[in-house]
């Protein structure tokens, strides 16, 4: 049973389109995240979200929006896709509070914008 | 803001030999967590090892061990008896305990090649 799962694993789309990536975690964690990994492998946090607070990296364009229907899900919606959005997007989760453990990652979704 | 530096973009090691990957970080906090993650070609991010800053003892996990030097803000990873399956990108990561620990910062990564 996959702890953090995201779908789809691969997306290929045209510039200007809108796309969504779904993420679900079955670990009961409080906080979920979206990371972007570019072609040079740099991992950059885009959002972190728990049931209390959404923290947005201020460098993320507002074309990107997280949507959380419940504690176990954090979807990523991207409007008006651009070439520079091509990357691997990772969903992750962590347990917070007194015990601050590691991030658990999904398998990543490779987005290619043509 | 915290930063994490990995000064070795690429490293290589002969199979069965030992290699050390470097990581330094910058923080004004006294309590935090440090991690090494491995990303093989499958792109899955896998936790290799974790170190709590308040613990003086270096963490070990089988063939993987760290040299944690808190005063120097250094956190290197040693891989002993290297195996072909160790070939991957390795990321050093820092986690703050503030803000419910949501502040995770990753280094730029080191690509490790294992030569047969």
Image: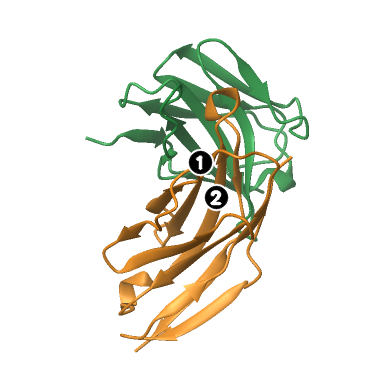
Chain colours: A green, B orange
Return the chain for callout 2: B
Tell me where residue A58 appears, x and y as whole percent: 77, 29
Residue located beneath label 1 in the image: A90
Q: Report which quarter residue A17 is drawn in.
A: top right
Give the structural element (helix, strand or loop) at label 2. Answer: strand
Count of labels in the image: 2
Of marks 1 and 2, the one in the foreground = 2
Quadrant showing the N terminus of chain B: top right
Percent x, y of residue A108 = 46, 44
Q: Along the line of sight, which residue is nearer the eye, B53 or B86?
A: B53
Using the image as rendered, state which of residue B83 and residue A76 is in the foreground: B83
Q: Quadrant of residue A64?
A: top right
Tell me if residue B30 comes above or below residue A20 in the rendering.
Answer: below
Pick the front one: B42 or A99: A99
Residue B93 is labelled as 2
Residue displayed at 43% across by 40% down: A102
On whether disc 1 and disc 2 are found on a single subunit, the reply is: no
Name the image quarter holding residue B25: bottom right
Front-most of residues A81 and B82: B82
Q: Where is residue B111 in the image (x, y as percent from the top left)?
A: 53, 70
């Amino acid at each position: 049973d996959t702890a953090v799962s995201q779908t789809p694993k691969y997306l290929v789309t045209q510039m200007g389109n809108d796309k969504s990536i779904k993420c679900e975690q079955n670990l009961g964690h409080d906080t979920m995240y979206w990371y972007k990994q570019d072609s040079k492998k740099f991992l950059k946090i885009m959002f972190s979200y728990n049931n209390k607070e959404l923290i947005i990296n201020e460098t993320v364009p507002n074309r990107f929006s997280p949507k959380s229907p419940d504690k176990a899900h954090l979807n990523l919606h991207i409007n008006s896709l651009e070439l520079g959005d091509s990357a691997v997007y990772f969903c992750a989760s962590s347990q917070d509070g007194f015990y601050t453990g590691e991030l658990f990652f999904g398998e990543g979704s490779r987005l290619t914008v043509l | 803001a915290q930063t994490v530096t990995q000064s070795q973009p690429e490293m290589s090691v002969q199979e069965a030999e030992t290699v050390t990957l470097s990581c330094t970080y910058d923080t004004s906090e006294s309590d935090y967590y440090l991690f090494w993650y491995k990303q093989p070609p499958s792109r899955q991010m896998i936790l290799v090892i974790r170190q709590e800053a308040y613990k003086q003892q270096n963490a070990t996990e089988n063939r993987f061990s760290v040299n944690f030097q808190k005063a120097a803000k250094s956190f290197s990873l040693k891989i002993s008896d290297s195996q072909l399956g160790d070939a991957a990108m390795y990321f050093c990561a820092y986690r703050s305990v503030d803000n419910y620990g949501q502040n995770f910062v990753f280094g730029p990564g080191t690509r490790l090649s294992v030569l047969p």
